Amino acid sequence: MIPRRLAPLAFLLTATACAALLPLTTAESARIDTFDFVWQELANEYPMFGQQQVDWDELRTRYRAAVPFAREPHEFQHLIAGMLSELGDLHVSYEAARDRFAPPGGAATSLLDAKGFAVMPIEGRLHVVGWPEGQAPLAPGGVPVGSACPEIWRVNGFPVVLSLVGNLLLGPAGSPIELQLRWRDGTVTRHAMRRPAAAAARPAPLFAHLDPKARGARAAKVDDAAWIELCTFVDKGEVDAAEMALAQPEAQRGVVLDLRRNQGGQILLAQRLVERFLPSPIDFVFVPKDPVATWFGLFDVELFVVDEWRPQPPTLLAPLVVLTSALTGSSAEHAARVLQRHCGAIVIGERTAGAEAVVRSSDTPDGSVLRFGSTRVVDRTGVGLQREGVAPDVAVQLTVADVEAVGPARAVAEWDERLAEAAAAALTRRRAGR
C-alpha cells in the first residue's frame, strides 16, 4: 500500500508515464527515423571518436528524447545540427532544403539576412564584425576598450562549428534567436535578436574574406614570381588554370601558391598539382574505421591501402611559398603538408583547419545530405592532420585585435600586405640558399 503522503507523487509519475506512452504521429516517426539514420551512420563509419572525446551514445539519448517534441520543422533541423556540432569537426555538415527551416507556407530567413549583421571567421572561430543599427550588445565590464567583435560561442544553446552554424542561424522569418557571445577576456554574455522578416537579396557571407566565392579579393603580388590563387580542389578547371600558370616564365623565378580560401575537394586534383613539385615518390596511407572484413563468413581479411604520389616531369624546382589560413582544409591541407615536408616549400600564414579525412556523403530518409570524414589519411609514420592541421613556418595571422583596431576591410588589406611581404622575403632567402 502506498503511504498517503506519497500518493500525489505516485499519481503524477503515473500520469507522466501515460502521456509519454502516447503513440507517435507519422511526422514524429519520420523525424525519429531520420535522426536514427544520422546517428547510426556516424556510429558505423566515423573514425574520429577517439580524438573527439565525446560520448556518442549519451548524445543520442539526450538529443533523441527531444525529437518528438520539435513543434516546428526548424527545431528538428537545429537538433540534428546541434548534435553534430558537438563533434567540433569541420568535415561534418548537414544540408537540408531551406523550406525545412520554416512552418508550412512560411518563409525561412537567416540572421545573415539582417541588414548590417556581418560575421568573419577569425583565428578559426566565428566573430561578429557588424551589427544592425541599434542592436549591438554592450561589452561586459573589464573587457578592453574597443572590443567590438565577440565570438559567437553558441546559438540557441548549441555549439558553433563553421560547417554547421549556417543551419542554426536559419529559421522562420521574424523568429527569435539567442546568441551566446564570448569576449576577448573569456566572458560569455547572452544577446537576443530576431531573424529578419524577409530574406536579403545578398546576405552577408558566413566566411567573408575567406569565402571561396569571394573572388574579388586579391592580395598584393610578388612582382617577379607567379602568384597562383587556388580556391578549390573541386573544380578541375581551377587546377588546369594553375598548371597553365606554372608554365609561364615567372614561375621559373618562384611560385606563391595561395591556398587560404581552399577548403579542399578531390584529393586526386590536389595530387595532380603537388606531383609537379615532387622530387621523389611519397606514400599516403588510408585508414578505414574497420580494416578487418569478413569474406562470406568464412575468414577475415585485413585491408591495407596505400596511395603513392609520384613526380610528374618536368619537375618545377623554383622557390615555393604556400599561403594558408585557418580555413585551408582537407585535400588543400594535404597539399600544403606535402609541399612543406617534401618539396622545400615555406608555408606562411595561419595553422590550417585540421580536417584530414576522405569525405563520405549519405542521403538521409527525408532527403537531406549528411557529410563527414569516414577514412583517415595519414603518412607512413601514422601521423595525420585531424585537429592539428599544418603549422606554418612563418606565422602571419589575422587577429581579432587587428579587426577591432581598423575595421574588417582594412584589417584584411593589411593582412594581405603582410603576407606579400613575408612571401617576398621567403623567396629571397630561398634564392640565396638560406
Image (tube, rainbow, N blue to C red):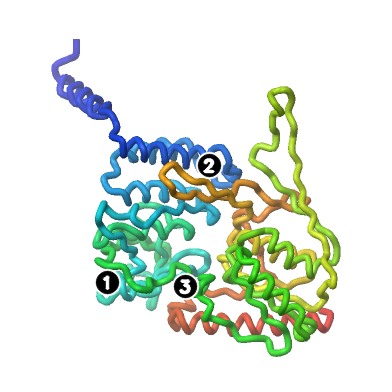
Q: Would residue 111 appear left or right of 205 to someone viewing this image?
A: left
Question: Which residue lies at the image location 56% right of the left edge and 65% below the top edge?
Answer: 327
Residue at which label 1 appears? 135
Q: Please state the horizontal and vertical placement of residue 152, each as a whole percent of the image.
A: 40, 63
The residue furthest bottom is 223
Query: Is residue 148 visible to the viewer in this orientation of the structure?
Result: no
Q: Earlier in the sequence, mark 2 or mark 3?
A: 2
Residue at which label 3 appears? 208
Question: Which residue lies at the image location 79% right of the left edge and 58% below the top edge?
Answer: 309
Residue 42: give its label: 2
Say few, some or many: other residues with alpha carbon within 10 Å of mark 3 (under 14 / 14 to 19 / 20 or more): some
The amino acid type, in three-letter code, at marker 1 is: Gln
Q: Please state the horizontal and vertical placement of residue 63, each as a whole percent of the image.
A: 38, 41
Asked if the residues shown at circle 1 and circle 2 are in contact, with their CB atoms under 8 angstroms apart, the answer is no
Question: What SS does tag 3 mark?
Answer: helix
Mark 1 or mark 2, which is nearer to you?
Answer: 2
Q: CA distance from mark 1 to mark 2?
A: 39 Å
Question: What SS does tag 1 mark?
Answer: loop
Question: Which residue lies at the image location 28% right of the left edge and 34% below the top edge?
Answer: 25
Question: Which residue lies at the image location 48% right of the left edge and 50% below the top edge?
Answer: 369
